[in-house]
Image (spheres, rainbow, N blue to C red):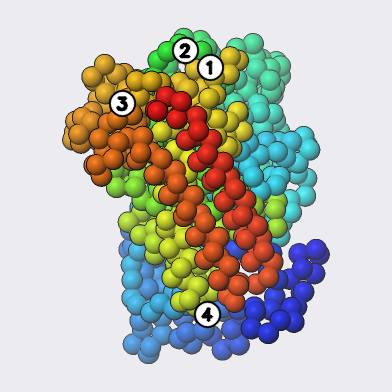
């Protein structure tokens, strides 16, 4: 109701977009057509029905469209659009999801003023998933946009907010997302209790027509908390050892129960033996033994297990955390069941503003892998900073092949009116979906089409704001952690600078000083083979050589791989210290110009979104200055 009232507030100022928008419509702000479009659909499924309805309601092009399934086409979510002899459009797909994606493709072309050409498209990744880090109490780990849209207050969501969930499903479908993990990887064992599974069933029922299947994160020790009928006399078990017969029985019985409720359930996501989570290592079993036990339970139903490679324990001593995933998983290559996929964060550390790609992608040869990207900007200004992640992911895809079965993005969605906290954070949800469909699309093109649909088609808006978006990631890197610096964050909330951070109660792996190693002799983490940890050697050729050699290491990764004197000569002839300061200052200057550019955008943006984005940009400007002053001020004691 509040939302409705707000969107009814008409402004009187001439020349300014008249409706105050709250951003809830995301990039789906199409105006209904006047009728007159004839849509024939031979596929009688709810999903095909939605595809036809969307076109009936919003399509303003050719008056005749037919949708039909074609079993001759490649069996994936792709689609083909062709012209009929009578000038109409024919949409064909092997699956009804393909029909839905074709409908949204046409509407996107329409809204962005693109021609409707015959096309055949197939997604790069078969599974395109969101990962929600939502807890059953309704809070969200690393969520910056309000509380969970799925769960609340330690009790199952008995009546799903269906219209909200439908809006969520529709938005995802419009960008090709076809699955979602409903709970945090730091999973409560209670997630698998029957009362919660009943909620999962209700959510699945709402999402299914939009082509979205549901998945759950599971706690490896769930059998020790949740009882299952017919196993151990209906009592929880005393172990979660994956080689224990009762444990395997427990998972089989639980999985059968899930599939009775949700026949198209997608599978499990597991964080094991990482950051204090239980796992097979607690019983001296390997990741493969743990994953395979779950894989065997779910295989008869056609489900999968996504096993995360983000592993490191606390207090493991002075070892190099970025090497751990490759060190633990490479020896297991070839030992996983076919329905196990290893889910790997884009970088080897933890979603830093910039990281080189994770070398585990180079190490596994016989095991399916999937990238995990983080949409929620945990380390990139959260929902306070305008940082468009398209360029960062494009950089990742320039190193890592997209020939993988699946991809996941850690969601930035909550109950806030505009879903994502910052209006521009919606673009990161959008670009994730678009790149999961086609990682070769340029981030710039995606930024532009998102701006067109979300705000305005006017070139006076599009040109400057595409520039803002495209440069915003590098800008954030500049004012936070340029030249390959990493993890210089304050506290556990990961917001704000703390280069002096050396908290005695933190493990080394969380301490900023451990990562930047700034001292009189220089700055940076030596991961080369020249007196360093040798992490450079986990990469395939030629990157192992390139990164290892200070002369050839790209400057953006320099201090990730090398510890260098402050007087080191950079490519531009400046010393490292001068160059580092230049980056910090440049980052701030860029944010200054974003603030100015946005002020020019008033004629193209409704009042509420104009104000809200402006407020956040002011905040970002203040934060960028803090980062610059704090970091330069701290490093100066060593550098000068
Ligand atoms: C869900 C980082 C985050 C944690 C997160 C973890 C993970 O450490 O700070 O909040 O936990 O990554 O990806 O498992």
Q: Residues within 10 Å of mark 4 (few under 14, many from 20)?
A: many
Say left or right for 325 vs 615: left
Whether residue 331 is visible to the viewer of this picture, yes or no, is: no
The answer to which of marks 2 and 4 sits earlier in the sequence is 4
Q: Secondary structure at mark 1?
A: loop
Is 405 located above or below residue 317 in the figure?
below
Neighbours of disc 2 within 10 Å: few (<14), some (14-19), many (20+): few
Whether pointer 1 and pointer 4 mark residues with C-beta atoms closer than 8 Å, the reply is: no
Separation of marks 3 and 2 at Cα, in angstroms: 29 Å
Q: Earlier in the sequence, mark 1 or mark 2?
A: 2
Q: Is residue 497 above or below residue 149?
A: above
Which residue is labeled 2 in the image? 316
Marks 1,2: beta carbons within 8 A: yes
Query: Which is more foreground, mark 1 or mark 2?
Result: 1
Q: Which residue is mark 3?
A: 565
To which residue does mark 4 refer? 59
Label 1 to label 2: alpha-carbon separation: 8 Å
Q: Could you tell me residue 107's position as x and y percent?
A: 49, 73
Crowding near the residue tagged with mark 3, few <14, some 14–19, many ≥20 C-alpha atoms within 10 Å? some
Quickly name the residue at label 1.
507
Residue 552: x and y in percent read 20, 36
Identify which residue is drawn at 39% across, 31% down. Answer: 348
């Amino acid at each position: 109701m509040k939302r409705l009232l707000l969107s009814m507030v008409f402004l009187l100022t001439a020349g300014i977009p008249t409706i105050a928008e709250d951003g809830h419509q995301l990039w789906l702000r199409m105006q209904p057509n006047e009728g007159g479009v004839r849509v024939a659909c031979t596929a009688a499924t709810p999903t095909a029905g939605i595809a036809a309805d969307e076109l009936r309601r919003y399509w303003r092009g050719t008056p005749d469209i037919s949708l039909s399934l074609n079993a001759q086409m490649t069996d994936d979510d792709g689609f083909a659009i062709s012209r009929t002899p009578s000038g109409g459009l024919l949409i064909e797909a092997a699956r009804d999801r393909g029909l839905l994606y074709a409908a949204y493709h046409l509407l996107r072309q329409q809204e962005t003023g693109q021609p409707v050409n015959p096309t055949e498209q197939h997604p790069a990744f078969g599974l395109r998933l969101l990962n929600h880090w939502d807890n059953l109490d309704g809070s969200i780990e690393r969520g910056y946009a309000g509380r969970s849209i799925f769960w609340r207050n330690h009790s199952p969501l008995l009546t799903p907010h269906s219209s909200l969930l439908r809006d969520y499903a529709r938005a995802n479908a419009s960008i090709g997302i076809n699955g979602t993990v409903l709970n945090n990887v730091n999973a409560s064992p209670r997630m698998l209790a029957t009362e919660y599974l009943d909620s999962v069933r209700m959510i699945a029922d709402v999402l299914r027509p939009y082509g979205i299947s549901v998945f759950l994160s599971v706690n490896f020790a769930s059998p020790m908390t949740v009882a299952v009928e017919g196993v151990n006399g209906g009592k929880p078990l005393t172990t979660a050892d994956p080689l224990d017969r009762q444990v395997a029985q427990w998972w089989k019985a639980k999985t059968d129960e899930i599939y009775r409720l949700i026949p198209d359930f997608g599978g499990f996501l597991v964080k094991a033996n990482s950051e204090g989570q239980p796992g097979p290592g607690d019983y001296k079993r390997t990741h493969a033994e743990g994953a395979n036990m779950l894989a065997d339970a779910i295989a008869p139903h056609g489900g999968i297990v996504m096993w995360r490679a983000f592993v490191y324990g606390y207090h493991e001593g002075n070892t190099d955390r970025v090497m751990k995933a490759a060190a633990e998983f490479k020896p297991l290559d070839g030992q996983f069941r076919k329905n196990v996929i290893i889910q790997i964060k884009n970088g080897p550390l933890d979603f830093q503003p910039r990281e080189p790609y994770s070398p585990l992608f180079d190490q596994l040869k016989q095991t399916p892998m999937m990238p995990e990207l983080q949409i929620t900007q945990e380390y990139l200004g959260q929902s306070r900073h305008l940082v468009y992640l398209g360029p960062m992911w494009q950089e990742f895809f320039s190193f890592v092949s997209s020939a993988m079965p699946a991809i996941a993005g850690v969601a930035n969605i909550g109950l806030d009116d505009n879903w994502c906290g910052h209006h521009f954070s919606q673009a990161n949800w959008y670009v994730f979906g678009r790149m999961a469909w086609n990682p070769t699309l340029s981030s710039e093109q995606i930024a532009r089409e998102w701006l067109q649909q979300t705000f305005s088609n006017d070139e006076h808006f599009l040109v400057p704001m595409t520039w803002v978006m495209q440069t915003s990631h590098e800008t954030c890197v500049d004012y936070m952690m340029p030249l390959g610096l990493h993890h210089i964050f304050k506290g556990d909330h990961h917001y704000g600078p703390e280069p002096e951070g050396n908290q005695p109660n933190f493990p080394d792996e969380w301490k900023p000083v451990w990562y930047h190693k700034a001292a009189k002799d220089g700055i940076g983490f030596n991961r080369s083979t020249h007196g360093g940890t040798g992490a450079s050697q986990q990469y395939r050729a030629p990157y192992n050589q390139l990164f290892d050699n200070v002369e050839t290491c790209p400057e953006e990764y320099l201090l990730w791989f090398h510890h260098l004197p402050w007087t080191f000569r950079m490519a531009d002839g400046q010393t490292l210290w001068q160059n580092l300061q230049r980056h910090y200052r440049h980052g701030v200057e860029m944010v200054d110009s974003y603030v100015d550019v946005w002020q020019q955008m008033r004629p193209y943006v409704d009042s509420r979104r104009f104000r809200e984005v402006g407020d956040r940009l002011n905040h970002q400007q203040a934060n960028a200055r803090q980062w610059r002053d704090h970091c330069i001020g701290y490093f100066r004691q060593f550098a000068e």
